[in-house]
Amino acid sequence: MSDLSQIVKAYDVRGTVPDQWDERVAGALGAAFAQMLDGAGAPGEAVLIGHDMRATGPALAEAFATGVRAEGRPVIEIGLASTDMVYYASGALGLPGAMFTASHNPAQYNGIKMCHAGARPVGQDSGLAEVRDRAQALLDKDEPLGAPTAPVERRELLAAYAAHLRTLVDLSDIRPLTVVVDAGNGMGGHTVPSVLGDAVLSALPLHIVPLYFELDGTFPNHEANPLDPANLVDLQRAVVAHGADIGLAFDGDADRCFVVDERGEPVSPSAITALVAARELARHPGSTVIHNLITSRAVPEIIREHGGEPVVARVGHSFIKAEMARTNAVFGGEHSAHYYFRDFWFADTGMLAAMHTLAALGEQPLPLSTLAAEYERYVASGEINSTVRDQAAKVTEVRAAYPDAEVDELDGLTLRFPDGAWLNLRASNTEPLLRLNVEAPTAERMTALRDDVLAVVRR
């Protein structure tokens, strides 16, 4: 008997196939998703379904579709897709959707990211817990689902998705750029050619150098997780070898984008958040911009300098999207390279962030390292994980070690110091981990504070 509490997380479904979940579970989740939508006041709407390049995706997606159709809802299959392509379809067509992906996780994993119509997130507090409980009840009955009664159709939406993105950022008048793109054998290999590559070369002054564009859910070259520096090494080398202006790395479902400058050095997601925020504020003066608690303190500084209103949110896409909708924010960014746009139904899209970065680079003559330096004001540790059995006790111990620091408990423990340094210590929702982020005005101060905190956490 499947225990769905093991695979239904705070924001999505994710687990190993077939030991944690399989087609039977996918069918129950599809039926439960349709039932949840009925209860949410959206009866009869078709459900959009896409999947990434993982070998288990098509069968799981088909089983989910069967469950949806058994509840009397039509299904629109869009086939191979990036997660932001499903968000595009949900927003443009005004329909709920489900994307089968495990994002950056290894090959044996798969999962589902669900959304309401208009790309509104389905999380624990917005339908996912109900989907879990309804699906668990269906599985516990151990009875087959009813026969599908609603139709299914197939639509190709890649070209429409690409065309929509090109209406949001005009790259036709920038200077010529050589761009190395590492798709990591993930869905960027499917979407980048349509948005930036051969299909539009006549209109865009871009020379794309592809790395690992072949769709392969076994990830034969490296994991599709650019947050791990080891997975950026090939891109960094290729940027230098080709004398490229910029490198872009996408994760497995291509909803996140990481940037490397012409020297092969990573540009922090905080700098990209500030850069894109400045561009969006130039178009929409005085707007609100959302950033999470872990982004550099340069981000709210730069938002204010460009006439915007920064609003801080907890880490996680459901919190960011909720704050964006509440404030009608024009843009939002996270330290994990998720970027959210009002022009994209408040949803996250790595491709649109990449296009903004290309535009910013190509509209001026300086190299990316010089341009990015305007947005990199402080020294950050990056996120450091420590395995800790009693997380709450360690957080209390760290807080007691700095009695004179300013305390913020919006998301974990944040301590701010008079010299501008700060730290954040957060417990993982799913693992016995504490996540530490430290930032300071100098490398020496950051290193000392980081090491002091880790000594407390790990002793």
Image (spheres, grey):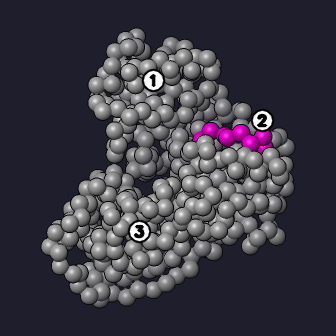
Q: In the depicted view, which residue is nearer to us: 151 or 223?
A: 223
Residue receiving disc 2: 370
Q: Position of residue 128 (x, y in %)?
A: 30, 59
**Magenta segment, principal secondary structure?**
loop
Residue receiving disc 3: 98
Q: Earlier in the sequence, mark 2 or mark 1?
A: 2
Magenta stretch contains residue 419:
no
Amino acid type of disc 2? Thr
Residue receiving disc 1: 454
Q: Position of residue 146 (x, y in %)?
A: 23, 84
Q: Residues within 10 Å of mark 3 (few under 14, many from 20)?
A: many
The magenta segment: 262-269
Secondary structure at badge 2 equals helix
Q: Nearer the viewer, mark 1 or mark 3?
A: 1
From where the camera sits, is residue 367 visible?
Answer: yes
Is disc 2 in contact with disc 3, using a CB cutoff of under 8 Å?
Answer: no
Amino acid type of disc 3? Ala
Cα separation, mark 2 vs mark 1, equals 33 Å
Q: In the depicted view, which residue is nearer to us: 328 or 302?
A: 302
